[in-house]
Amino acid sequence: MADATKPSADFIAAAESILAGNDDAARKQMLEAAMRATAMLESPLETVWRIIMSPHAPAALMTLIKAGVIQKIAQSATPVTADQLSQSSGAEKLLIVRLLRPLVALGFVKETSQEEYASTRITTTLVDRSLLGGYQFMFSAVTRSLANLPFYLEKTDFKHVSGAPGPFQDAHNTSDNMFPWLIKDPPMMGNFNAFMAGQRADRQQWFDLLDVNEILLNGAKDDPDSTLLIDIGGGEGHDIAEFHKRYPSAPGRLILQDQPPVIDSIQELTPKVERQKYDFFQEQPIKGARCYYFRSIFHDWPDAECVKILKNTAAAMKPGYSKLLMSEFVLPSNNTPLYPALLDINMMAVLNGMERTEAQFTELLDAAGLKVVKFWSVGAETEGLVEAMLKD
């Protein structure tokens, strides 16, 4: 029987060397190799059992977040005992010990001695506002819909989800779509907004990766009263504020549009960016802008609603001048990477929406009187950019 001790030690040493070099590209390359190795070494039975047991740790983690146990461990500079955690949270000691076991095994928490716990890098990362809010939103709103998805689809004789009522409405016993449902629950809306702000902050911007002059600035009006860029459904304004930082001398107005509760919740935004309350299912009030920009909006909606949004935008666009930019995952026609494939299932379960291929985006735009100028891509696992204009 072959001894894997030395090859295993060599692989770990190589990983440690990569980490010591602080080269993130090399780290990701090594991680990809490790994941390929895991897929090769894991038996089919082990893979199936891993999936079967996958819901358990997230449920334990959510319980400990709601009890405040994870936050307490993260905040403590020294290890804390199960008795101390029970006293501070009100949760029973035995429950805490049992729920922490899988999280210790996964590295979320370190057990320094029997029933004594300390934070790890994962713990301190998790309690960041955006991730802690995101985890609670995903577990409360999304996991319920995902768990119910097979039973909902069975009731529909496995029809494709193309609009409301859908899996979310069925799981949450509501007639509301997710966004009106969130508005009725301010704490959950706060979790969602923090999650979205964090996601936007961590993602690479299209204007850092692609040719901004070719896409946007060349040919834009110099008039300071003209509108250069409208970020439609742009949340707290992270994207458009970052654009202004990168291109402070770009001519024209910068406008952020979103629903009133979102605009009202903004705590900090550069004065250069104008705030406007707007529902993109209504007529677009800003006419003839150079760019109407949407980031991660269309995957939230079924085709019919997407066409309505696009038609409202197209009606405001100036022929031969205005551009519509959509920052979205553009799925390949085959062998979709795991993350966008999972995100597509997420959109189905929560918003009756979907991730789309080039052909599907082209069809949507055509139905709204628009044409594709170019699909810009930097890789299948990263959001692309769909550039469109009015048809001739």
Image (cartoon, helix red, strand yellow):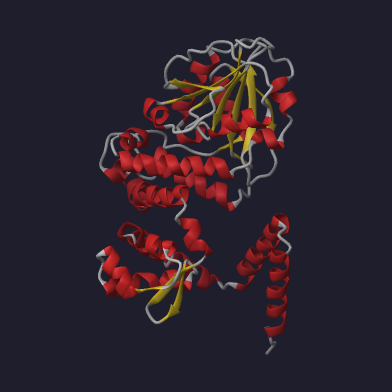
Query: Which of the two residues, 256 or 346, is positioned nearer the viewer here?
Result: 256
Residue 53 percent coordinates (x, y): 42, 67
- Total number of numbered discs in the rendering: 0
User: Would residue 61 be visible to someone looking at this image?
Assistant: no
What is the x, y in percent for residue 381?
A: 63, 47
Residue sitting farthest toward the bottom = 1
Percent from the top left, x then y, of residue 283? 45, 14
The answer to which image quadrant residue 182 occupies is top left
Query: In the rendered image, which quarter is residue 294 located in?
Result: top right
Q: Is residue 71 left or right of residue 23?
A: left
Relative image position of residue 309 (x, y in whole percent): 48, 22
- Residue at image point 25% right, 70% down: 92
Q: Is residue 54 visible?
A: yes
Compare residues 128 and 52 and report the one nearer the observer: 128
Residue 307 in the image: above or below residue 189: above
Looking at the rendering, in which quadrant would you find the N terminus?
Answer: bottom right
Residue at the location (52% across, 17% down)? 313
Q: Is residue 148 above or below residue 332?
A: below
Q: Residue at (73%, 15%) from the top-left corner?
A: 219
Residue for point 64% across, 33% down: 385
Q: Quadrant of the C terminus?
A: top right
Q: Look at the picture and state if 13 lies above or below 354.
A: below
Closest to the observer: 384 or 207?
207
